[in-house]
Amino acid sequence: RLLMMRNGNQAVKAYRNTTFICLFLAVVAIFLGLAARVVLPVLGHGDEAVLTLITGYLPAGVFGIAVIGILAVLMSTADSYLNIGSIMLVNDVMIPYNKRKNREFSDAEKLKWARRFALFIGSGAIIFASLRIGLFDLAVLVEGFWFPTILAPLYFLLFNMKIPFKHFLFNAIIGFLTFILWDTY
C-alpha cells in the first residue's frame, strides 16, 4: 500500500490513522484474551478463547450478530488476499516473463490468468487450513517467511535503491533457509 501513495505526506497520514485503528484492535484483542483467562481459567488452547466466549456467554441474537461480524471480517480479508495475490502473480511474474518473449497479454487474458491464480491460491489456502495449525503458529510461520524474503528488498525499493533480480533471489533464498534452520533448531 505504501507504493500506491501519491507522496510522503499521504503515506504518513495513512500510517498514522492505521496505527490508531490497529492499536484499538490490539487492545480489544488483549481484553478479550484477559476476559477468557478470567472466565475460563482451564481453557486448553488460546485459539479457542474467543469462540468459547462467544458460544458460551452471548445471548442468541447477539451471538448471531457476532458470528456474522467475524465471518464478514474473515471473508473480506480472504477475498482481498486472493485478489491481491492473483493480480500480483499476473502483473509481477507473468507479464514481465512474457515481455522477454515479446508477447503481450490482452485484458481478457490477464483476467483469465488472474482467475486461475486465484483458484490456485484459494485451493492452497484450503489445503493449508485443513492442516489445523493454530492461529499463533500460523502467524509466526507467515511472518517467518515474509520478513526474511520480502522485507529487506522492500526497504531497498522504498529508499530508491535498485537491486538486481539475482540479488533479490539470493536474499529470498538465504532468508528462507535461515527461517527453516531457525525453526528447525
Image (spheres, rainbow, N blue to C red):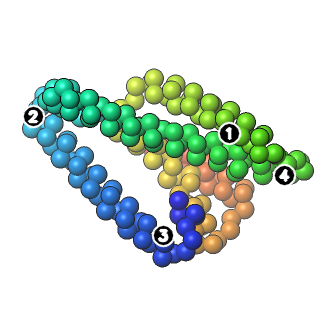
- Distance in Å between CA atoms under marks 2 and 3: 41 Å
132 to 14, vertically: above or below: above
The answer to which of 62 and 162 lies nearer the viewer is: 62
Please report contact status of discs 4 and 3: CB closer than 8 Å, yes or no: no
In the image, which disc is placed on residue 39?
Answer: 2
Mark 4 or mark 2: name the one nearer the start of the chain: 2
Residue placed under numbered mark 3 in the picture: 11
86 to 57, vertically: above or below: below
Residue placed under numbered mark 4 in the picture: 99
Q: Is residue 77 left or right of residue 155?
A: left
The answer to which of 103 and 107 lies nearer the viewer is: 107
| Mark 4 or 3: the one toward you | 3
Identified at 27% across, 52% down, the residue is 26
In the image, which disc is placed on residue 114?
Answer: 1
Q: Is residue 155 visible?
A: no
- Distance in Å between CA atoms under marks 1 and 2: 46 Å
| Mark 1 or 2: the one toward you | 1
- Distance in Å between CA atoms under marks 4 and 3: 32 Å
Q: Secondary structure at mark 2?
A: helix
| Mark 1 or 4: the one toward you | 1
Please report contact status of discs 4 and 2: CB closer than 8 Å, yes or no: no
Amino acid type assigned to the residue bearing label 1 in the image = Ala
Mark 2 or mark 3: name the one nearer the start of the chain: 3
Q: Is residue 119 visible?
A: yes
Mark 1 or mark 2: name the one nearer the start of the chain: 2
Amino acid type assigned to the residue bearing label 2 in the image = Val
Q: Secondary structure at mark 3?
A: helix
Percent coordinates x, y for residue 21 in the rendering: 32, 58
Please report contact status of discs 1 and 4: CB closer than 8 Å, yes or no: no
Identified at 61% across, 55% down, the residue is 171
